[in-house]
Amino acid sequence: MTHPTPHRVIYDTDPGVDDAMALYYALAHPNIEVLGVTTSFGNVTVEQAAVNALYLLAIAGRGEIVVTQGVAAPLVKRGEAPPDHIHGADGLGNLPQRQATPTQLDARSSAQFIVDMARQHPGDITVVAVGPLGNLAMALAIEPQLPRLLRKVVTMGGAVLEPGNVSPVAEANIWNDPHAADIVFTAGFNLTMVGLDVTHQVILPVSLFAQIAQHHQHPATDTLHHAVAFYANFYSGLYPHVAAIHGCFGHDVLAFVALTNPELFSTETGRVRVAVDGLAQGQTMLRRKSIDYPQSGWGPEVPDTQVCIQVQAPACKALIERTLMGAWLGA
Ligand code: BDR
Ligand code: CA
């Protein structure tokens, strides 16, 4: 299904290999207009996230897109060292070299940029947030009306039925800032959660990115191929069924797929809360509508989230391939 007018998106990200994949899907997709890229700590430091966002845009010939630097640490808990072994020390699979690119950050914080854009275009903008959720939490502190000013938020994070990937119950983005996540899940956004329940169903082989690089013969797709190969080594070392195709999970790109092609997902709608401390820190919990749980914290003041539960994986893979193979890169 196509959207009649492009989805006008602010991409909130911590690039990160799958973040890079998602960025290029967004740039390549005819129904997505990327208005800005807001960065946060997570897969790398926020400084490196901003450098990577600028670099990925510049080599794709999209250096005109605004990039801002955002939160450097979780709102409450202590930050942790970035996972070099998953995304590389540089976040892009340890690139052997980088082209010199003219890069300039917007002076505003990521939160301020989100607020400014939402105020200028009320009801029009979607935030696709694929890192820890501190920038959105800070934006809410600046502008409490943000849930009404944004069209939608789609976030990659959390898990309802699937085990976690940093603890038995916590997914990395939520784990990295559980307090921010709980603020975002209870703020009243038109919110879709794309968590491990669906991202663990979509395994993308390195060979797909080799084909894309071969097809385009372009620094942007060469960079993505290099990064994905590094990332796939990590996932292939962890899961035999991923190793079988030398692949990786597409995580963040699925947030954009859920935006452009929601018909590929089935969702369950209900109140989601985040465990902010203790053994379950970072767990996302979905309250089933059928049971009237008596505990506090689950009342009607908690807004609903649409939680992606199932996904048509082959159709997602085909869509990602078709989109990235399209004519989205200049010479
Ligand atoms: C999420 O955590 C990060 O490592 C990835 O970029 C993705 O956003 C997956 O748990
Ligand atoms: Ca990410």
Image (spheres, rainbow, N blue to C red):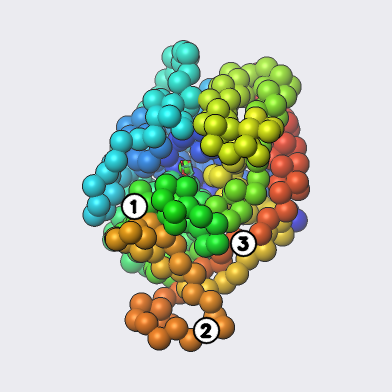
Q: Residues within 10 Å of mark 1 (few under 14, many from 20)?
A: many
**Does residue 256 appear in this view?**
no
Mark 2 lies on a secondary structure that is: loop
**As drawn, is 90 to the left or to the right of 261?**
left
> Which quarter of the rendering shows the C terminus?
top right
The residue at 39%/34% (across/down) is 83
Q: Nearer the viewer, residue 115 or 325?
A: 325
**Going from the N terminus, do you reach mark 3 or mark 2 first?**
2
The residue at 46%/31% (across/down) is 87
Q: CA distance from mark 1 to mark 3?
A: 23 Å
**As drawn, is 293 to the left or to the right of 253?**
left
- Contact flag, marks 3 and 2 (Cβ < 8 Å): no
Q: Given this view, does label 2 or label 1 mark the residue nearer the observer? A: 2
Q: Amino acid at mark 1?
A: Asp
**Does residue 276 appear in this view?**
yes
Q: Nearer the viewer, residue 112 or 187?
A: 187
**Going from the N terminus, do you reach mark 2 or mark 1 first?**
1
Mark 3 lies on a secondary structure that is: strand
Return the residue at label 3. Answer: 309
Return the residue at label 1. Answer: 177
Q: Amino acid at mark 3?
A: Ile
Q: Given this view, does label 3 or label 2 mark the residue nearer the observer? A: 2
In the picture, residue 14 is in which quadrant? top left
**Looking at the image, is 108 positioned above or below residue 103?**
below
**Going from the N terminus, do you reach mark 1 or mark 3 first?**
1
Return the residue at label 2. Answer: 291
Q: Amino acid at mark 2?
A: Ile
